[in-house]
Image (spheres, rainbow, N blue to C red):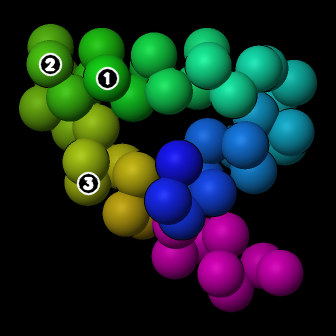
Amino acid sequence: MILGVSSWLGDKIGLKEKQVRLLFILAALFLGTGVGLYCILWMVKIFTE
């Protein structure tokens, strides 16, 4: 929401922003990778714009 990763990724893979946010939350809760994955995708977003 702050960095725009959810909307950017949603546009790239064809999902809605809410769905991407839910996937990040589930990944953080069950896999422990949501926050790290979010940071990595934020860096990818910055360097590909």
Residue hosting label 3: 36
**Relative vertical location of residue 4 with respect to residue 18 in this rendering, above or below:** below
Read off the residue under disc 1: 25
Q: Earlier in the sequence, mark 3 or mark 1?
A: 1
User: Horizontal and vertical percent for residue 28?
Assistant: 20, 29
Instruction: Report the Cα–Cα distance between label 2 and label 1.
Output: 6 Å
Task: Please name the amino acid that badge 3 sits on.
Answer: Gly
Coordinates of residue 2 in the picture (x, y in percent): 50, 59
- Dominant secondary-structure state across the stretch colored magenta: helix
Q: Is residue 23 left or right of residue 29?
A: right
In this figure, which residue is indicated by the disc labeled 2?
29
Q: Residue at x 15, y 14 (%)?
A: 30
Q: Hey, which quadrant is residue 14 in on the image?
A: top right
Numbered disc 3: secondary structure: helix
Tell me, yes or no, if residue 41 can be seen here: no
**Residue at image location 12% in from the left, 32% down from the top:** 32
Given contact means CB atoms under 8 Å apart, are the residues at marks 2 and 1 in contact?
A: yes
Q: As shown in the figure, which amino acid type bears the numbered disc 1? A: Ile
**Residue contact between numbered discs 3 and 2, judged by CB atoms under 8 Å:** no
Drawn side of residue 40 relative to residue 26, left or right: right
Does the magenta segment cover residue 31? no
How far separated are the C-alphas under marks 3 and 2? Answer: 12 Å
- Of all residues, the one furthest to the bottom in this rendering is 47
For label 2, the SS is helix
Q: Which residues are magenta?
A: 41-49
Q: Residue at image x 25%, y 48%?
A: 35
Mark 3 vs mark 1, CA separation in Å: 12 Å
The amino acid pointed to by label 2 is: Leu
Q: Position of residue 19 (x, y in %)?
A: 61, 15
- Judge whether residue 39 can be spotted in this image: yes
